[in-house]
Each structure stands twice: as C-alpha cells, then as structure tokens.
Amino acid sequence: MNPPLARLAVLISGNGSNLQAVIDACNAQTLPARVVVVVSNKPDAYGLKRATLAGIPTEVLVKKKEQDRSGYDKELAQLVLNYQPDWVLLAGWMRLLTASFLDIFPNRVVNLHPALPGAFPGTHAIERAYQAYQQGLIEETGVMVHLVPDEQVDCGPVLGIEHVPILATDTLESLETRIHQAEHNLLVRTLVQLIQPTTF
Ligand code: GRF
C-alpha cells in the first residue's frame, strides 16, 4: 500500500506560478503530496485563484495595523496548524517570518529563493544578479530551496540548487523567465526527495 500523501500548506503573496507547479505535480502523481491549504497575506494574489480552480481551500490573512510581526505570525501559525500540514512551503511569500511562526514548525518550513546560496538574499534577487552580470561580477546565477530554521533572510540548510547561466543576449525579462522555469523544476524535484527520499 502506498504511504499517505504528504500534506502541504503553501504560503504565497502573488502570482503563484510555483504553487501551480506543485499543484500540477500532485495531480500528475509525480509528487506524493496534497496541497491542503493556500494562505496569502494579499487578498488579490493571483495564486488564490489558481488554488480555487484546483479545489484547494484558501485563507487570506492580512496583517492588522495594531498587530506587531510576532502577533501576526502567531495568528498565522494557528491558522496553518488547523490544516495539520507535514510541510509549510513558502512559494513567493513576501513576509519575513519570526520565531513565533517558525518555532511551531521546526524543520518543516521550506523556502524557495531565486538566487544561489549566500547570493542576493532578500527582494529583487534576479534584478540584482542581472546587474552584477552587467558589471562583470558574476557569470551565472541560480535558484535554491532551503529549510528556514530561524529569522535570517533566505538562509538555512540547503535542500537543492540549480545553476542558471546568464547569457550575453539576456534581457532582465528573459533571465527572469529562465529563473522561474528553473524554480518550478527545482521545487518539485526537491519536494519529491524531501517527502519520500528512498521509495518514490
Ligand atoms: C519566485 O521567484 C520566488 O522565488 C520569489 O518570489 C517569486 C514568486 O513567484 N520568492 P510565483 O508567485 O511563484 O510565481
């Protein structure tokens, strides 16, 4: 008998193309998992539509003015806990999480970042890599998937990386397109290994 499908909670803030890659892999049964909830901090995130189309429950949690980061994260953790996830996946989640959230899911929070480990943490990573290439500082960039043990930004035990060369003919847009393709592939590949390292 097959083991039960891993339960994924996916946190998003925007387009959700990585969420879509995960949904597609679940549906194709290449990933032995099920997205049990999609949570957004933005009510207008397109990824919410993708989730609804796929029949996945959605939650929107906007930070209230009177809340501090820790207060928001406690509420978020409670919300996510209700869905009993095995893994919490940050797929374009644009808020830094505090220990109030992370300590509830030790070794269970996975982040995707559009740069190689240690390079360009934070926002606009692809743009900054493209500029660094123009200045002759780098020849390639990449994407990574890592665990999020603490409040450091885009940092933690690396689960997978994919190198993406930067081409002399690249525009920022063409580089972005290749980076996103690499992310979609790497994310699914890494989740497959993480969820069933030996038998799947
Ligand atoms: C991705 O590049 C991800 O690495 C970054 O935000 C982007 C989200 O893209 N943190 P999408 O919402 O999955 O399309």
Image: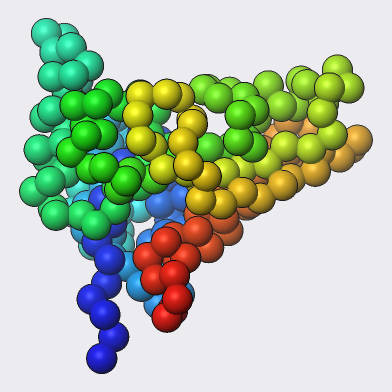
Residue 48 appears in the rendering: no
Quarter location, residue 166: top right
Could you tell whether 137 is left or right of 21 in the image? Answer: right
Seen from the viewer's position, the closer of residues 37 and 103 is 103
Identify the residue at horizontal 42%, vertical 61% (top origin).
Answer: 194
In the image, residue 153 sits, relative to residue 145, either above or below, namely: above
Residue 39 appears in the rendering: yes
Label total for image: 0
Identify the residue at horizontal 22%, vertical 16% (top origin).
Answer: 69
Seen from the viewer's position, the closer of residues 49 and 82 is 82
Seen from the viewer's position, the closer of residues 4 and 93 is 4
Could you tell whether 189 is left or right of 194 in the image? Answer: right
Please identify the residue farthest to the bottom as the structure is shown: 1
In the image, residue 149 sits, relative to residue 49, either above or below, namely: above
Residue 187 percent location from the top left of the image: 50, 54
Residue 113 percent location from the top left of the image: 53, 37
Identify the residue at horizontal 20%, vertical 47% (top origin).
Answer: 58
